[in-house]
Every structure is written in structure tokens, then in C-alpha cells.
Image (spheres, helix red, strand yellow):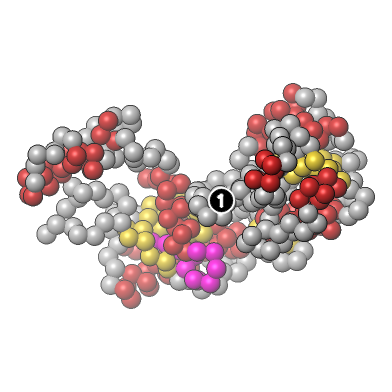
């Protein structure tokens, strides 16, 4: 019988994960109980997604603002320029509190009209009307207020983030808005790069311009400070608020967890499933203009079967061109044959145009993130079936 259902994604409920829990056993048991209860049959190449927060919590990968402050103080002897942070309570406010704990004077440089993720600090149309050039113009905090108002609220959180960050760093520090990272060198030569995806370029520009100390958030808490959590690869990137004085870091050793889950499910079911750890999805909200991906990567760990890009052909292109004179079963048979005989690399072939060449892990991570949500769904594990199937799969 022909397959009538393609890709499906199901959120799997788990117990509440705490530090020290056996995450591998909990994930495996949760998946097996769910498939038994729902009458689901696991298949080869099914995908199990586990949200990064489960891994980090099981590891106890947390740090306090004091831990952050101590590491900052050890790396920056005097004043510090902090440039291009995300505008976020959840992502950066606690990091900034930690930086302030170092007791260094802070020169905070914000990008405008929005941060790297698309969180706006001003009305872009008003910026244009005022003839402000975001590529060249630096705005002091006072000028920003005079031009745009004393209370500029984020449309989703209703928070004035410039005021929030001012309250954190104190009155003796400075806030500027500019998009040229070299602007910070007018105030200090020691700089902490706080943006995520352009951090390598920002570091390169500043080093070439004569900066002294140039580090990124990925260079802070790369090892434990007073028994804190840490991440040797990403440091504070991927950090989320945990409490009023602590943050949860991006998880470590993710390859270990995905392999252990894969092996345990193979032993118990005889099926080799693929496993990935996922964080933020890689998509942009069309209404709020905010890019979801504030983590350094979508997936910090995944099994080998998820390496690479999809290799697909565009069905509607074939239907409208090569197969336009075929109908019914004849068209279906011809389409399946086209799929079965497609080349191993369809990149830039006319019949593949419009099939976006994105990493499989980025696509699946986005699907997992949308399925599990970030609120109270309680499904931090996702089972994806049929992703590697196609129209020709029987």
C-alpha cells in the first residue's frame, strides 16, 4: 500500500530534569513509553531531538553573576568596552550584571536601529526622517533620548532596554549607539565582543584597528570559576537566564549524549535512529522582524546520519515542465522514477531550484524548536518520522 503520510513531528513529555539525573535513561524511557502508549512504530532513520536545556540542567551547567564577574576581572585590568550585545532580559541582562560585578567601568556600545537578532531600539522610519546614517553616526545616550524619546519600549516585552542596561551598569559607565565597532576605541582599547554570529568579523576588525584586549563572550567561562559551570567551546554564548543571580550555559559534551541515546534505542528496539541536541530554531518572525537564533549554533551535537544537506528535486518544477503532458498514474510513476534516479548531488541542477540548501540539522532543529515550544508544552524531546522519506518511498 502506498504511504499516505510524510514527515510527522511529535512532542514527547518527560519528567522534570534536575542536576545529576540520568538524562540518557530518561530520554530513552520517555520515547519508548510514548510510542507504546500511542501505538507508534519506530523506524530506521527516525530522529530524536533533545532540547539543549535538558542536557545543561542534567549537567548542572550553571554559573552565577559573581562567577562571571570574577572571570571578567581576571581578563580585563581596567575599563572595558562591551559591544553589540543582544537586547534581551533572558539572554544578556544577567551577563551584563556579571560584567558589572567585575567593578570595571563599562563603555556599552549598542548597534542600531536594531541588535543582531532584530530587536529594535528605535523607529527605523523616524531614523530616516532624522537623516541619521546608521553606518557612520554615533549617538550618545543623551542624543538618543532627545531624538527618540525618554521611554522607548520593546513591542513584545514592553521594556525600555537602554534604561534596563543603564540601571545595571550604573551612572558612572557610558552607553553609546553605533555600528562601527572601531567607535569603541575612542573610549577604551580593551573590548569584549558580545554579538553572536558576526563575532569573528568584529574581533578581526578591532584587532586590525589596534585594540589591545579583544575577547568575545565565547572566551568567558570557558573553564570553571569556583566550581561553576562552563563551556570550553562557546563560553557564555547560548546562555539563558536561570534565576535573578544565575544563568544556564550552553551544554557540554553533546556528542556523548546523542551517541548514548542512539545506542540505547538500537539495543532496545533494533532500530538505528538519529539523535540531535537542539536549541533555537533558525527562522525569523515576519511580524516582529526578530531572528530566533540567539544560540551560537542550532545543534551542538548530532549523530553522523544528520550530517550534510538535503538532496532533493522540486516536484512542482518537474510537474510543470518535463512531466507536464502526463496525468494520473502515469505522472505518479514518472515522478517516482525521476526521484529514484536523481543524481547524488543535485546542487544547482534546474530540477532542484527552490530547494533551499540548508544544513539538515538546521532544518530539523527549527522543526524541533517549533514543535516543543519555549513555554509550558512540557515536550522537550521531539520524535520526527518520515523526514528522510520522499514521494517515491513505499
Q: Which residues are magenta?
A: 373-383
Residue 21, horizontal then vertical, whole percent: 57, 67
Q: Residue at x 57, y 60 (%)?
A: 53
Residue 355 is one of the magenta-drawn residues: no
Residue holding disc 1: 289
Residue 30, horizontal then vertical, whole percent: 43, 70
**Viewed as shown, does residue 176 lie left or right of 334?**
right
Instruction: Tell me the element at label 1.
Output: loop
Q: Is residue 108 visible?
A: no
Q: Nearer the viewer, residue 97 or 351?
A: 351
Looking at the image, which residue sits at the far right? 172
**Viewed as shown, does residue 328 lie left or right of 33?**
left
Q: Nearer the viewer, residue 149 or 240?
A: 149
Q: Residue at x 15, y 44 (%)?
A: 336
Q: Nearer the viewer, residue 337 or 276?
A: 337
Looking at the image, which residue sits at the far bottom? 37
What is the quadrant of residue 200 in the picture?
A: top right
Residue 182, horizontal then vertical, whole percent: 77, 30
Residue 380 is one of the magenta-drawn residues: yes
Q: Quadrant of the N terminus?
A: bottom left
What is the quadrant of residue 320 in the picture?
A: top left
Residue 343, horizontal then vertical, whole percent: 24, 32
Figure check: 182 above or below 196: above
Q: Is residue 298 visible?
A: yes
What is the quadrant of residue 338 in the picture?
A: top left
Q: Residue at x 42, y 68 (%)?
A: 12
Amino acid at each position: 500500500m502506498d504511504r499516505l503520510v510524510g514527515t510527522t513531528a511529535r512532542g514527547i513529555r518527560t519528567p522534570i530534569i534536575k542536576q545529576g539525573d540520568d538524562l540518557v535513561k530518561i530520554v530513552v524511557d520517555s520515547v519508548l513509553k510514548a510510542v507504546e502508549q500511542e501505538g507508534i512504530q519506530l523506524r530506521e532513520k527516525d530522529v530524536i531531538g533533545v532540547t539543549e536545556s535538558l542536557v545543561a540542567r542534567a549537567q548542572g551547567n550553571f554559573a552565577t553573576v559573581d562567577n562571571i564577574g570574577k572571570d571578567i576581572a581576571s581578563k580585563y585590568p581596567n575599563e572595558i568596552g562591551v559591544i553589540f550585545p543582544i537586547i534581551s532580559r533572558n539572554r544578556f541582562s544577567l551577563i551584563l550584571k556579571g560584567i558589572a560585578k567585575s567593578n570595571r567601568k563599562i563603555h556599552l556600545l549598542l548597534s542600531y536601529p536594531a541588535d543582531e537578532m532584530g530587536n529594535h531600539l528605535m523607529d527605523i522610519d523616524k531614523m530616516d526622517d532624522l537623516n541619521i546614517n546608521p553606518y557612520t553616526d554615533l549617538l550618545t545616550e543623551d542624543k538618543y533620548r532627545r531624538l527618540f524619546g525618554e521611554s522607548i519600549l520593546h513591542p513584545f516585552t514592553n521594556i525600555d532596554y537602554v534604561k534596563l542596561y543603564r540601571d545595571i551598569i550604573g551612572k558612572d559607565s557610558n552607553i553609546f549607539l553605533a555600528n562601527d565597532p572601531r567607535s569603541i576605541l575612542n573610549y577604551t582599547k580593551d573590548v569584549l565582543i558580545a554579538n553572536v554570529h558576526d563575532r569573528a568579523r568584529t574581533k578581526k576588525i578591532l584587532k586590525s584597528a589596534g585594540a589591545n584586549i579583544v575577547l568575545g563572550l565565547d572566551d568567558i567561562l570557558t573553564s570553571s570559576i569556583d566550581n561553576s559551570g562552563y563551556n570550553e567551546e562557546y563560553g557564555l554564548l547560548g546562555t539563558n537566564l536561570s534565576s535573578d543571580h544565575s544563568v544556564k550555559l550552553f551544554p557540554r559534551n553533546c556528542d556523548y549524549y546523542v551517541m548514548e541515546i542512539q545506542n540505547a534505542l538500537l539495543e532496545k528496539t533494533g532500530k538505528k535512529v538519529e539523535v540531535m541536541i537542539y536549541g533555537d530554531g533558525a527562522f525569523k518572525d515576519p511580524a516582529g522582524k526578530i531572528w530566533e537564533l540567539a544560540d551560537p549554533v542550532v545543534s551542538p551535537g548530532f549523530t553522523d546520519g544528520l550530517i550534510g544537506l538535503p538532496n532533493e528535486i522540486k516536484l512542482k518544477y518537474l510537474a510543470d515542465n518535463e512531466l507536464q503532458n502526463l496525468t494520473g498514474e502515469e505522472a505518479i510513476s514518472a515522478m517516482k522514477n525521476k526521484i529514484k534516479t536523481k543524481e547524488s548531488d543535485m546542487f544547482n541542477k534546474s530540477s532542484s531550484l527552490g530547494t533551499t540548501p540548508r544544513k539538515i540539522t538546521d532544518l530539523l532543529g527549527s522543526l524541533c524548536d517549533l514543535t516543543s515550544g519555549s513555554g509550558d508544552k512540557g515536550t522537550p524531546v521531539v520524535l520526527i518520522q518520515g523526514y528522510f522519506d520522499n514521494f517515491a518511498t513505499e
